[in-house]
Image: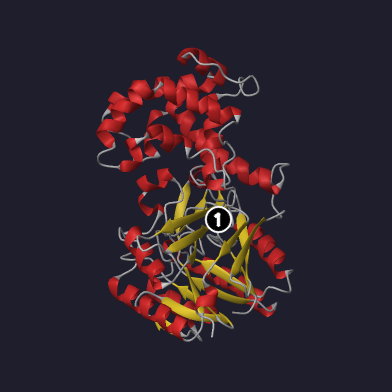
Amino acid sequence: MENLSFYLVTDTHYYDSSFKRTGRAYEERSRTDQKCVAETPAIIDAGFEQIAADRDTNIILIPGDLVYRGEYQSHVGFRERLYKLREQGKKIYLITARHDYAEDPVEFDGDQTIPVPGMQREELRDFYREFGFDGAVSEHRESMSYVAQLGKGVRLLALNCDGDCKDFKGIWDDQMAWALRQIEEAHQSGNYIFAMTHYPLLPFSPVMNFIGDAKLTDWETVANKLADAGVDLIFTGHMHAQAVTEYVTEKGNTITDVQTGSFVGCPCAYRKVTFTDRGTVDIKSYTIEDFDYDKGGRTAQEYFQWRFDRLITDIIDAMAYDFDTFTGRFGGPEKNKKLKIPVTIIGKVLQKLTLKKLGRLLWFKVDQSVADRLVKDVGVELVRNVFVGNEPYVPGTPIYETMAKMLRRLHPITHIIEKKAGTKNPVLADIDTFALSMIGDEKQRDYDAKIMVNASDYRK
């Protein structure tokens, strides 16, 4: 294995500048979205310019969700940007994902959404044939997966995990059989091979066990098969989160899932990955420093955070002031309005409740340094931190201790939930541990990490 480096960019969600994106219809859609949409041409151009400036790293991997909602013209505009990168000496390897084929593609004009032509899934492979498919070592055409030789002694297993394009978001049996043959062949020929999928292989946080598409369907089966076959590293996207997660099989083999945040939404991250001939993978994370757009006087990072926080704040505000909007965020207004009064009361209380007042209500003391913080603001930050990664509130920090005290006071209630829900889902058998694990990460390697891989095992 020779020294080799590449950039990892995911979830670009490009929305072509030719489309209309103004008015109430767009604003209503925009407020429910973590990622930016109208801003994508400016953000992607700025980000690609930063990457192109690195003359020493010529490989870029993109694991899917290239465009917003499958608009044909968005694919045309995005491919033009890939061609420009290629002209600057970059080699690009990509897979497509759910947002890349027609999903009611529209443009926004005032109060209206207007249908626009969409890309069909069966067109994607040939449309992007120059970016990984042509020249592949092997290809599984049925799933649009392939193996590419990135450099001397290093191969990429690019696995499309669209599944049935509905509920099954995973790897088909024949696709897995093909992948296992490619892994064995790579090892026999002296190549280290790692994988790339769109959906995360592993749930990167306990709460992700409850979100269906936060990991591959049958993820444990897939993780065991890949790891036991000798794949110990996989790069993923989809959840717009920065996370480095490990899984160890019963046979003692470890696979590490390096998930990267969206290129066009908080935390707006991308990675540079460097393989060394000693089997060390050095991972560094970067962000887009600025982009040409009216950001209301904010820096780029302030703008991305503002967009994310607005999404969560709107949900909390809807609890207090607009019950139908609140329930609409979760699948449509409830027919049964019995929830309305308690939800509205909770929402209104959260508008003014501070940590100090919360402590008084539950009979525990809050550290003075955080006493005046609104519970609502802390909640928004904690949700944001799950996606931003490197969650800072570890034991000993005032926020962690406040959460721990609150959970201890609420334990008579949570214990009832543990007894009922814990039998069906082990994650809920200890709610205190479940909650506290989401706010603090002592490893702090979601951005920068050094990972040891078994490259020397296959070198000849």
Toward which corner of the image does residue 181 lie, by quadrant?
bottom left
In the displayed structure image, the side of residue 449 where residue 110 appears, left or right? left
Residue 16 pos. (x, y %): 57, 62
Residue 218, placed above or below residue 375: below
Residue 338, placed above or below residue 180: above
Which residue corresponds to the image point at 37% horizontal and 40% vertical from the top-left?
Answer: 330
Count of residue discs: 1
Residue 199, placed above or below residue 136: above
Q: Which residue is at the front of the view, 33 or 183? A: 183
Crowding around mark 1 (Cα neighbors within 10 Å: few <14, some 14 to 19, many 20+) is many
Image quadrant in which the N terminus is located: bottom right
Q: Which residue is at the front of the view, 261 or 455? A: 455
In the displayed structure image, the side of residue 160 where residue 59 appears, left or right? right
Residue 455 pos. (x, y %): 54, 74
Q: Amino acid at mark 1?
A: Ser
Residue 362 pos. (x, y %): 46, 15
Disc 1 target residue: 262
Image quadrant in which the C terminus is located: bottom right
Coloring applied to the structure = secondary structure
Which residue corresponds to the image point at 41% horizontal and 43% vertical from the top-left?
Answer: 207
Residue 345 pos. (x, y %): 41, 19
In the displayed structure image, the side of residue 25 where residue 283 appears, left or right? right
Residue 116 visible, this angle: no
